[in-house]
Image: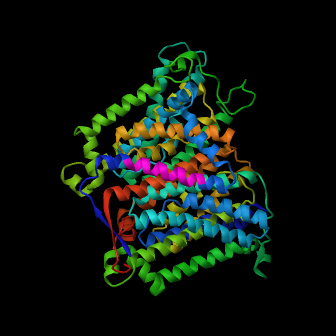
Amino acid sequence: MTILAFILAGTLAAATPMLLAALGELIVERSGVLNLGIEGMMALGAAIGFVVTYQTQNPYLGFAAAALGGIALSMVFATLALALTANQVAAGLAIGVLGQGMSSLLGKPLESQTLNAPDKLGIPGLADLPVIGPLFDQDIVVYLTLALAVAIWAVLNHSKLGLIIRAVGENPSAARAVGFPVLRIRLAAIAFGGALAGMAGAYASTIYTPLWADGMIAGRGWIAVALVVFGTWQTGRIVFGALLFGALSLGGLIGQAAGVGLPSQFLASIPYIVTILMLAVISSNRRRMRLNTIASLGQPFSN
Amino acid sequence: MKLVFERREAASRSATLATPLIALGLTILTSLILFAALGKPAGQALYSLLLEPFDGWYNISELLLKMGPLMLIAQGLAIGFRANVFNIGAEGQLIIGAICASALPVYFPEGTSPLMLPAMIVMGAVGGAVWAGLAAGLRTRFNANEILVTLMLTLIATQVLNYLLLGPWKDPHGFNFPQSVMFPDVALLPILLPGTRVNISVLAALIVSGLAYVLMRHRFSGYQLLVGGLAPRAARYAGFSEDRAVLMSLLFGGLAAGFAGACEVAGPLGQLQRSVSTGYGYSAIIVAYLGGLNPLGIVISAFLMAALFIGGDNAMVSADLPVAAVFVFQGLLLVFYLGSLTFIRHRVTFSWQGPA
């Protein structure tokens, strides 16, 4: 496979875990809640997904269990952030630590075990095209994630549900005054974010690199949080950002293949360095940030 | 049914002290259930985690050794947390501090100058402050979120450490282990308690805690930072700038973490190795909260967290628990602490006027 084909084929798959988690966090933040526990929910989902798939040999069960695990952890966050009006930054960090610890604990017995990666589903006709063919030869989760991105864009911008979520995030008091159950909508958003983060983790551990290694999420949950910020809470820009990071995370492999004389640690750092640079470049436009930032983000609300 | 929270004018002192204890109790209970569910000997695990750290002189001395860096870093972080500046990258600042401090003994392994140790400590503290300062600059100049930047800088710091230990700084006679040369005697901290690994850095941590207390009590910058965090607009009217709060919070945090990193390599490790990063930087976040972001509270919570670290090591051996169990325990501790805090700060009443 040529390097170009490798990049085309690999970018989408590498982007998928970050994109799935970021889409979930997008909904959470649009409803006015900041959940920084994505890394922990992904780690937990990765461990549960791996263990269940390993035991049952059924990847669908693995994904379902990972989603439930993500939801369960996100409900701990919701209890603190919504019911008990705790500081959302601290609450997110708390479930982050908890999730990563649980992940190591659950995955420990299966350290270094592997799974069979599922078959790719080529889109008939397109997958056989020269040069860009590999782009259309992906596993099913990649297609579903892209479809979900389109669905979330449509719901947020062109549906009553989207309008309600945005209203709750922008002005919860007004939303409450016209009769929307603010806390329940936020609860649902947090659960949705938890489910997607759990599945994002499962994708990383059972499909993208089907091997259990402790700490395998390696900051991807945090990059997902960053993606939402520098996607300025817009679905399309988040997809673009995720693809960019997908390509960057292949940088190490491509660099080695091309015989670049840089240390592998530097290549591994590229996504983190680019995250910082992107954050600085996009956030420095204070006017645009103010226009796009969710007005009530991170602020507790009580009825 | 619904819960109604009314903010109390001031939390009572006994309630403030009770919160971490309630959290600890709930954490123990939950862990018992969790370990039992995983088929681990729950009683043995809890004994190892909670009581064994206090059993015998050796365990207590190791506890003091771990308490130092946790206390030091948490004091630095609490300054920022009180001002709503969230430096969650103390782990990275600790690593960079350890690296900067190690530069001297790595390049002068035969050194005999008594100035080497003080120079290392200064380099470590400055290194940590510069690493945190990057995040401060990006926040004040480019409005970049310091939570994400400090975290990314930690991930980068880990890669820098790996690069140095696998490459240029690897001990040529170290059987290919990823570690630097052993430091000369002039690069090591004096031992405080003979026969143990406890060095004078624990005294430094206690002195810093005292300074932090004075700083917060008297109306120096601690007060400005507190106001800046609680009421940014009021603070601005009073002439305190938000940028200065961000800068000071991050610099103090980085300084403390870098200092702690230097003390690790010049103390118990005696060389630069991967295990310089054992999660002190992350655990210190929990230490800071559990201590109520109060300098005196942090001394107590650092003691507790150090016991947990020792206990985790013991549980690994005696109850077959992975090291990660400590992080489950820490996570639960913070979850329960934040939860019970609400009940301390608010008067809670139930009302039956139907759902909200």
SS majority, magenta: helix
Horizontal and vertical percent position of residue B349: 32, 67
Is B24 within the magenta?
A: yes
Residue A129 in view of the camera: no
Q: Is residue A216 above or below residue B295?
A: below
Residue visible at 61% across and 55% down in the picture: B34
Asked if residue A213 lies left or right of residue B144, the reply is: right
Q: The N terminus of chain A is located in which quarter?
A: bottom right
Is B250 within the magenta?
A: no
Residue farthest to the front?
B43
Asked if residue B341 lies left or right of residue A41, the reply is: left
Residue visible at 56% across and 23% down in the picture: B197
Horizontal and vertical percent position of residue A222: 54, 57
Q: The C terminus of chain A is located in which quarter?
A: bottom left
Of the pair A19 and A24, the residue shown nearer to us: A24
Of the pair B164 and B14, the residue shown nearer to us: B14
Res B112 quadrant in image: top right
**Which residues are drawn in magenta?**
B18-32
Residue visible at 58% across and 76% down in the picture: A149
Asked if residue A76 lies left or right of residue A196, the reply is: left
Q: How many marks?
A: 0
Q: Is residue B240 above or below residue B302?
A: below
